[in-house]
Amino acid sequence: DEDPPRDDFRDEKLEQMPGMKKIVGAAGSAILWDVTLWHTGTANVSSRDRRILIYGYQPFWVKKWVNGLPPQVIVDWANTPRRRQLMGIHAVLGRASWDIKGVPYLPEHEEMVKAKRF
């Protein structure tokens, strides 16, 4: 199956997307989902402000900084393989200007990195 064209389902048309599942939780709820699935937020139509805390954990190869560069404080802090993986600072050498070239991948990911085209 192909995804529907992204521009066909924006704003008020978002909830008309085929297969769309709206997830609503009471205050204090926790929701877990696969962050590699297509997801978005919808308009707050209630009379109250709402707050949300999102913590995403995903495979190390999922691109995390698609809308720009990671904050420099994160790049500077991610100076070990585990910190790089945790924060998504794991670019293949030379792939991005912010890549820390002296910090390698985790040993258990080395074979996958060699096999995957980034």
Image: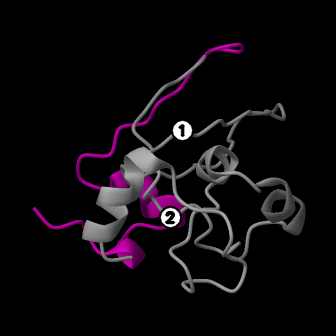
Identify the residue position indicated by label 1 in the image: 57
Q: Position of residue 78 (x, y in %)?
A: 76, 55
Identify the residue position indicated by label 2 in the image: 63
Judging from the image, what secondary structure is the residue with disc 2 in?
loop
Asked whether residue 111 is in view, the answer is: yes
Q: Give the magenta range.
A: 1-29
Viewer-closest of 31 and 47: 31
Q: Position of residue 43 (x, y in %)?
A: 64, 49
User: Residue at horizontal 69%, vertical 47%?
Assistant: 83
Q: Are marks 2 and 1 in contact (CB under 8 Å)?
A: no
Quadrant position of residue 25: top right
Q: Which mark identifies residue 105?
A: none
Distance from disc 2 to disc 1, alpha carbons, whole Å, reads 12 Å
Compared across the picture, whether 52 is left or right of 26 comes to right
User: Residue at horizontal 58%, vertical 40%?
Assistant: 56
Q: Position of residue 62 (x, y in %)?
A: 44, 58
Viewer-closest of 115 and 70: 115
Q: Is residue 5 above or below residue 34?
A: below
In which quadrant is the N terminus drawn? bottom left
Compared across the picture, whether 71 is left or right of 65 comes to right
Q: Is residue 81 above or below residue 67?
A: above
Overall secondary structure of the magenta stretch?
loop
